[in-house]
């Protein structure tokens, strides 16, 4: 059975070597951003639930830095893989909701490796 692009009906090309580097960089930053966001969530819970603001001093900055790099690498991958604007925006927003960056990373990896667009 041939994998096809649903809209065009043409066979979808498998992800070539040109996407391996951008995909790997995206995956690493998706995980880093997700972990940093979870730490930031814990920091918020500690600050507002237990009046302990110790983690807030570094957790917010860490997530912010990782998220900015995540945005750049996700856009780089989106341009090279020729994603739709809607798919790109959804992936970019995934770094702002706890656990969603992990889900988005898996979906993006499967689609890019299969040669399908987002």
Image (cartoon, rainbow, N blue to C red):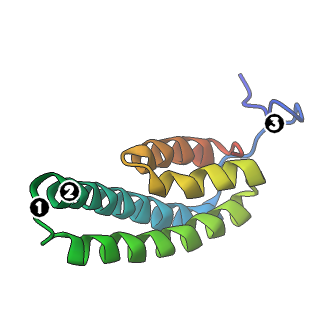
Q: Position of residue 86 (x, y in %)?
A: 73, 49
Quadrant position of the C terminus in the picture: top right
Q: Residue at x 53, y 41 (%)?
A: 107
Asked if labels 3 and 1 touch by Cβ distance under 8 angstroms, the answer is no
Helix or strand or loop: what does disc 1 sit on? loop
Looking at the picture, does residue 11 appear above or below residue 37? Answer: above
Quadrant position of the N terminus in the picture: top right
- Residue topped by disc 2: 48
In this rendering, position of residue 29 left or right of residue 61: right
Q: Nearer the viewer, residue 68 or 8?
A: 68
The mark that comes first in sequence, 2 or 3, is 3
Q: CA distance from mark 1 to mark 3?
A: 57 Å
In this rendering, position of residue 108 left or right of residue 80: left
Q: Residue at x 43, y 59 (%)?
A: 30
- Residue topped by disc 1: 51
Looking at the picture, does residue 1 appear above or below residue 70? Answer: above
Q: CA distance from mark 2 to mark 3?
A: 53 Å
Q: Nearer the viewer, mark 1 or mark 3?
A: 1
The disc label shown at residue 62, or none: none
Q: Position of residue 90 (x, y in %)?
A: 62, 49
Asked if labels 2 and 1 touch by Cβ distance under 8 angstroms, the answer is yes
Q: Position of residue 63 (x, y in %)?
A: 35, 69
For label 2, the crowd category at 10 Å Cα-Cα, with few meaning under 14, some 14 to 19 and many 20 or more, is: few
For label 3, the crowd category at 10 Å Cα-Cα, with few meaning under 14, some 14 to 19 and many 20 or more, is: few
Helix or strand or loop: what does disc 3 sit on? loop
- Residue topped by disc 3: 11
Q: Residue at x 61, y 42 (%)?
A: 111
Q: Give the image quarter of residue 61.
A: bottom left
Q: Position of residue 104 (x, y in %)?
A: 50, 45
Asked if labels 3 and 2 touch by Cβ distance under 8 angstroms, the answer is no
């Amino acid at each position: 059975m041939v994998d096809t692009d649903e809209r065009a009906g043409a066979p979808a090309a498998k992800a070539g070597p040109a996407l391996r580097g951008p995909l790997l960089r995206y995956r690493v930053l998706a995980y880093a951003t997700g972990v940093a966001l979870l730490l930031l969530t814990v920091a918020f819970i500690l600050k507002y639930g237990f009046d302990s603001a110790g983690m807030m001093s570094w957790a917010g900055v860490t997530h912010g830095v990782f998220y900015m790099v995540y945005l750049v690498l996700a856009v780089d991958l989106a341009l090279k893989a020729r994603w739709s604007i809607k798919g790109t925006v959804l992936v970019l927003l995934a770094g702002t909701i706890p656990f969603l960056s992990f889900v988005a990373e898996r979906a993006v990896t499967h689609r890019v490796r299969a040669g399908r667009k987002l």
